[in-house]
Every structure is written in structure tokens, then in C-alpha cells.
């Protein structure tokens, strides 16, 4: 595992999560929690990908870790558990895959499409990866909440 | 038989009018929390907390995508009321304030009228980050996203600028009540085109990825996670409605990106 790459991914995850924290109108005092949440998510996902796991499994492990950490730290943060979970996992939402999947579908309808079957397979692959990754993130976040829930939101 | 039915109909004890403001205040709290981006379980919980804190004995809530319906009862009396829910955004500070208010209501510190006044105050006084701060933060977030997607350093600056500008335009359009889906297409088109042109001028070798990274501010992350958690929590109707909305937003975002890529291809 390249430590510099792991650090890069972790820092980028932290910045992305904090940035989305501002977009979600989280107060400045709580932003470090958002950054920490994103950093943990990306660190775990990058580490698991480095072990040879696929994206869906790595995203599931990362979401599970974030969900469990948020449950444990819930009392210390003045921020709803739901928001902290989501902000941390936002950098893992496969937005680019989703865009490529839909663009692939658009390309299928083009009259100038020379290799429709390859375009179709690529678009379907992206669609499935988006579906499974979002499913993995949602399930990973939900399991600690469902197991350890005392109160759903703060 | 008639006697049996009559015993089920409560006598008018004169306390029924008090149920109306109580139900509406509890519904307003739930509506505000839902519009602030909460999932169905949170809405269910906060409405019950408000209603019971204000004196209700029984609370039943139905959480729909565009409306909430509540049945509350005190003693033998009960009423059912419905409330429309507006655009589902994300506002964490409002969410936080509502939970603080719910704690005060649970402790019995507030009457129905005082609670209503507090809800009105929260609607108008809860602070939001300024447009420029949001644009800067979103630009930074998308630039970081870009790095995660392997955009080279030359393309990262343009992604920051294009996403920041896109956020300013999005906020302006939403302030003018432009349809959310149209807004997504317009911002996606603008940000992807600007990101692409900027990355081209900066000598980036990852122009296509830079264009995609510039529009990631539009990915509906909160609704997509809420959709799944709502289904898992036993609200499949609401979860499905959220999932469909997410899918439609993604289609409109992709349409904007497609227009941007086509125009970029014509220019360069």
C-alpha cells in the first residue's frame, strides 16, 4: 500500500466531505467532524481497494466503519447522526459512473453509433456498479444504526 | 348493536378544539424537519415528541413524499389532519435547532402557542452560509472529488472555478423558484462546459473527467441515502418516491453534461 496515495485520498475525502458539509448548512464548529467522517471513509475504502477488494465491497466496508464510528461518537457531536453519516459517505457516491451510465444510454440512441453492443455493455456495467455501490453504502450505513439505535437522529 | 356503536363515539367534552393547534404544530415540526433533509424515522420521532410533549396521548403519523398526515388523540377525542411538504432540501442547522426545540417541548417548557412562535422564528432566523462561502466550499469539494477521480493537477483549478460558479448559479435559480430538474440541467451544462474549457486551456490531459467532476455538486447524495434507509426502516413508498426522484435528477444532470460535451466538441 502506497502511504502517500492513501494520505492523498484521505485528505481529498476530508475536503470533499467538509465542502458538502457547508452546502448542507452545517455550522463551522461541526465541520471538523464532517472532514473526519470523509477522511475515515476514504481511508478505509482506499485501504480495502489496495487489498484487491472490488469497489462495492470496499465502499460497504467504509460505510460500515463510518456508520459505526458515528454511532459511537454520537453523544460528542452536536450534529445529527444522519447528516454526519451521509456527509462522510458523499465522496464515495459514484456520481461519475452514474453520469457515464446515462451518457452511454444516450449514445445507444444515436444513429451514428458504430458498436452498439459494446456501448450497451459498458452502459449496463456502469449502471450496475452505480446501483451496487449506492446499495453497499446505504446498507453499510444502515446496519450500525439498526443494530445500535437508541434514537434515530441525535 | 346501535348501543355498541354509540359507546365508541366519544362525547364532546369541550377539549376537542385544543387538538387542532396541537396537531398543526406537530405537523409543522415534522414538515420542517423533512424539508431539512431528514429521513422518515426522524420525522416520525420528532412529530411524536412534539405531540406528546404538548399533551397528546396518542400519535399516529403517515409520512408521504409530498405530505404528512397525523392522527392525535387526548382522552376520548381525536382528530386527523394533513399538511403539505415543500421542496426537500438539506439544512443541517435547522435540523439541529428543531431537535433542541423538541427537547424543550418534551420537558414541558413550552405551550402550543409558544412552540408555534418558536417554529416561526426558526424558519426565518436559522442562519445559512453566505452564497460566496458556499460557492467556495462546493468548488473545493468538487476539486477534491476530481482528484479522487484522477483529474490531473492542471484540471483541478478549472474544476474548482466551474463548480463554484455552478453553485452560485444554482442558488440564484432556486431563489427564483426555477424547477429543480431544469436547474440541474442548466447548472450541469454550464459547469461541465466551463470545466472542460478551463481544463483545455490549462493543458489538462483529463478533460472529460474534469467536466464530470465539475458537476458532482449536483449528485443527490442525501436523497439517495435517505431512499434506502427509508425502505429499510419500513417506509417503502417514501423510499421508492425518493429513489425515482434521484433517478430523474441524474437523467437531467446527465442531459446537461451531454449538451456541454457536444458544445465542447464543436468548439475544440
Image: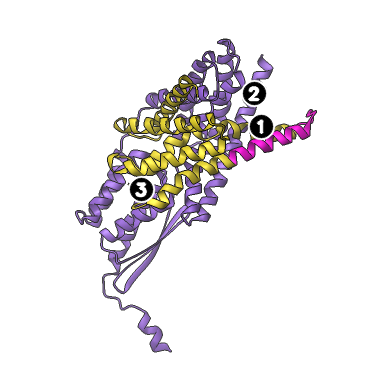
Chain colours: A yellow, B purple
Kindly identify which residue carries mark 1: A103
Q: CA distance from mark 2 to mark 3?
A: 41 Å
Output the chain of dot 2: B
Relative vertical location of residue B4 with respect to residue A81 in this rendering, above or below:
below
Relative vertical location of residue B46 with respect to residue A74 in this rendering, above or below:
below
* Residue B87 visible, this orientation: no
Percent position of residue A36, x then y: 37, 31
Which residue is drawn at the image coordinates 73% and 32% (left, top)?
A119
Output the chain of dot 3: A
Q: Residue A114 magenta-drawn?
A: yes
Relative vertical location of residue A29 with respect to residue B87 in this rendering, above or below:
above
Percent position of residue A114, x then y: 80, 28
The residue lying furthest to the left in this view is B109
Kindly identify which residue carries mark 3: A153
Q: Earlier in the sequence, mark 1 or mark 3?
A: 1
Output the chain of dot 1: A
Closer to the observer: label 2 or label 1? 1
Which residue is drawn at the image coordinates 72% and 31% (left, top)?
A107
A3 relative position to B25: left or right: right
* Residue A19 visible, this orientation: yes
- Mark seen at residue B261: 2
Pick the front one: B173 or A7: A7
Q: Which residues are magenta?
A: A110-131
Q: Same chain for the residues at labels 2 and 3, yes or no?
A: no
Percent position of residue A68, x then y: 39, 43
Picture quadrant where residue B140 is located = top left
Amino acid at each position: 500500500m502506497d502511504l502517500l496515495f492513501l494520505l492523498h485520498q484521505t485528505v481529498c475525502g476530508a475536503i470533499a466531505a467538509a465542502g458538502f458539509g457547508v452546502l448542507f448548512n452545517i455550522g463551522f464548529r461541526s465541520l471538523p467532524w464532517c472532514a473526519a467522517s470523509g477522511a475515515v471513509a476514504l481511508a478505509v475504502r482506499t485501504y480495502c481497494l489496495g487489498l484487491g477488494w472490488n469497489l462495492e465491497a470496499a465502499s460497504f466496508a467504509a460505510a460500515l466503519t463510518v456508520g459505526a464510528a458515528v454511532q459511537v461518537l454520537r453523544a460528542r457531536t452536536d450534529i445529527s447522526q444522519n447528516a454526519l453519516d451521509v456527509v462522510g459517505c458523499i465522496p464515495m457516491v459514484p456520481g461519475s459512473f452514474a453520469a457515464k451510465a446515462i451518457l452511454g444510454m444516450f449514445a445507444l440512441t444515436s444513429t451514428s453509433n458504430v458498436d452498439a453492443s459494446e456501448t450497451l455493455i459498458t452502459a449496463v456495467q456502469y449502471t450496475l456498479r452505480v446501483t451496487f455501490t449506492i446499495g453497499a453504502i446505504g446498507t453499510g450505513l444502515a446496519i450500525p444504526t439498526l443494530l445500535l439505535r437508541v434514537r434515530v437522529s441525535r | 348493536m346501535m348501543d355498541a356503536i354509540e359507546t365508541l363515539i366519544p362525547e364532546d367534552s369541550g377539549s376537542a378544539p385544543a387538538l387542532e393547534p396541537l396537531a398543526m404544530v406537530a405537523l409543522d415540526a415534522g414538515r420542517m424537519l423533512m424539508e431539512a433533509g431528514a429521513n422518515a424515522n426522524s420525522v416520525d420521532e420528532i412529530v411524536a415528541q412534539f405531540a406528546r410533549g404538548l399533551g397528546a396521548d396518542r400519535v399516529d403519523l403517515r409520512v408521504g413524499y409530498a405530505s404528512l398526515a397525523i392522527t392525535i388523540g387526548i382522552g376520548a377525542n381525536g382528530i386527523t389532519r394533513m399538511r403539505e411538504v415543500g421542496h426537500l432540501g438539506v439544512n443541517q442547522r435547522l435540523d439541529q435547532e428543531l431537535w433542541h426545540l423538541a427537547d424543550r417541548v418534551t420537558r414541558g417548557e413550552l405551550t402550543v402557542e409558544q412552540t408555534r412562535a418558536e417554529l416561526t422564528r426558526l424558519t426565518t432566523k436559522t442562519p445559512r452560509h453566505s452564497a460566496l462561502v458556499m460557492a467556495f466550499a462546493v468548488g473545493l469539494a468538487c476539486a477534491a472529488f476530481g482528484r479522487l477521480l484522477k483529474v490531473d493537477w492542471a484540471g483541478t483549478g478549472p474544476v474548482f472555478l466551474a463548480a463554484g460558479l455552478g453553485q452560485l448559479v444554482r442558488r440564484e435559480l432556486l431563489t427564483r423558484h426555477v424547477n429543480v430538474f431544469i436547474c440541474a440541467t442548466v447548472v450541469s451544462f454550464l459547469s461541465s462546459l466551463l470545466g472542460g474549457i478551463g481544463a483545455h486551456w490549462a493543458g489538462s490531459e483529463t478533460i472529460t473527467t474534469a467536466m464530470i467532476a465539475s458537476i458532482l455538486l449536483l449528485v443527490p447524495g442525501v436523497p439517495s441515502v435517505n431512499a434506502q434507509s427509508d425502505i429499510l426502516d419500513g417506509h417503502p413508498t417514501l423510499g421508492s418516491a425518493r429513489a425515482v426522484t434521484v433517478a430523474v435528477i441524474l437523467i437531467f444532470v446527465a442531459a446537461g453534461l451531454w449538451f456541454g460535451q457536444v458544445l465542447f466538441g464543436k468548439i475544440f
